Amino acid sequence: ATKMSGEMGKPLISHRLVDSNSSLAEPPREAPKVGILGSGDFARSLATRLVGSGFNVVVGSRNPKRIAGLFPSAAQVTLQAEAVSSSEVIFVAMFREHYSSLLSLSDQLAGKILVDVSNPTEEEHLQHRESNAEYLASLFPTCTVVKAFNVISAWTLQAGPRDGNRQVPICGNQPEAKRAISEMAHAMGFMPMDMGSLVLAREVEAIPLRLLPGWKVPTLLALGLFICFYAYNFIRDVLQPYVQEGKNKFYKLPLSVVNTTLPCVAYVLLSLVYLPGVLAAALQLWRGTKYRRFPDWLDHWLQHRKQIGLLSFFCASLHALYSFCAPVGRAHRYELVNLAVKQVLANKSRLWVEEEVWRMEIYLSVGVLALGTLSLLAVTSLPSIANSLNWREFTFVQSTLGFVALVLSTLHTLTYGWTRAFEESRYKFFLPPTFTLTLLVPCVIILAKALFLLPCLRRRLNRIRRGWERDGAVRFTLPLGHMLAEKTSCV
């Protein structure tokens, strides 16, 4: 407890950090006192951040002596009534059910700004029609309630906004109160966002309840592809030998079938990253303008490309790990021993197929290059890396190198298939090999990209993206003579 008190007593964010970082606003020289009602983890982290940003912090508690050691030494820990009376801005870091315990302080709270930082549980959010902030405003009608900082975690407050989300949604009915809280958020290193009146507090409180909203559709897509390819490979590699040859190969389900499925999912997901761009370009060429909205399904598809690409990299990485683990499996060892026994019985001293050696060497080499390029795409997708790149660098990595990764993945798949697509024995249950199915979409994308490189299509697409319209005309009014001139764009 003594060690924890010492660590919490020393602010993690010093004045030197605030002064040296130009992104943090300088707090006023005579910073007003800021009150905090609550003694939980969030209240302690909030006090640490406020003290480190140059604010005078007063913490109100029903038992100040017991919790004083948990807060920074620069923060004053006192009774709730004293903290409320000496502060103009008060952070209410308490749960909703404890709001009523503050009713005895109604007179001291009159005219104060109350900042509600609470978050309801999913059950409470569905149970109550009004937000926590609106409920707090109903209990204290003489106060100005502002909803803010509920999307910021206690860890982000202590470690600094660089390690978490910088945006702070703020809503309230008084513009002056929102402006004051926005200045405080900016001084603490965050980016305030005005979300409107206090009625929207319910929407702000719902933000932390959403679990990766942008990942739901891409994850379901990846899971659906995995199930489909896994079932397809199960029919070909396990069910067909069992039905037609009486061989029990169900041992392949945990490792071999999964390892055959993962590259298929990764390859198709990577192609789905660049397919909407091809469709969008074709749609612009067909319409002859860029000023018409894409269909909603295409617009949502374009917005989810980052998540789809990261899931593709995840599946490709798992495929590489499974491939490294495959030789360790007992089944692989038995197959090697059986092959050696057959070679001895056939009195063959050397089994060397030049074509297969070259195929596997090229297959593995191209696969490593494809995975390395995908790794670069994944790293540049991280916000900390992407923010350090200019627009041209980011576009080059995500667009040009991304297309190179797709081409390398296609070569990787082609060298794996080699001439197997033309062998009758590969069509088990009259089903084509799995890799032939995965080649359909990527080959269409590569062919479309090649067509867009033709001078006629490339020039037309560049002009459209620079604002040219096929049937558009721009009228200019000349200031001298009040003459009208019409300039019509030519193809």
Image: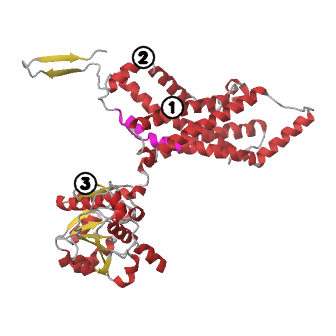
Magenta stretch, main secondary structure, is: helix
Quarter of the rendering containing residue 53: bottom left
Q: Which residue is mark 3?
A: 194
Q: Amino acid at mark 3?
A: Asp
**Farthest residue toward the left?**
481
Q: Secondary structure at mark 1?
A: helix
Residue 37 % position (x, y): 30, 74
Q: Nearer the viewer, residue 40 or 87?
A: 87
Residue 2 % position (x, y): 47, 80
Q: Which stretch did the figure color magenta?
A: 294-312
Q: Which residue is mark 2?
A: 455
Left-right relation of 404 to 431: left
Left-right relation of 414 to 290: right
Q: Which residue is mark 1?
A: 403
Which quadrant does the C terminus fall into?
top left
Instruction: Count neighbours of disc 1 (C-alpha within 10 A) and say few if under 14, some if 14 to 19, many if 20 or more.
Output: many
- At 40% from the left and 65% from the top, the residue drawn is 158
Left-right relation of 390 to 195: right
Q: Real-space Cα distance between discs 1 and 2? A: 19 Å
Residue 355 % position (x, y): 75, 26
Instruction: Count neighbours of disc 2 (C-alpha within 10 A) and say few if under 14, some if 14 to 19, many if 20 or more.
Output: few
- At 33% from the left and 24% from the top, the residue drawn is 464
Q: Amino acid at mark 1?
A: Phe
Q: Amino acid at mark 2?
A: Pro
Q: Real-space Cα distance between discs 1 and 3? A: 39 Å
Instruction: Count neighbours of disc 3 (C-alpha within 10 A) and say few if under 14, some if 14 to 19, many if 20 or more.
Output: some
- At 48% from the left and 25% from the top, the residue drawn is 449
- At 75% from the left and 29% from the top, the residue drawn is 356
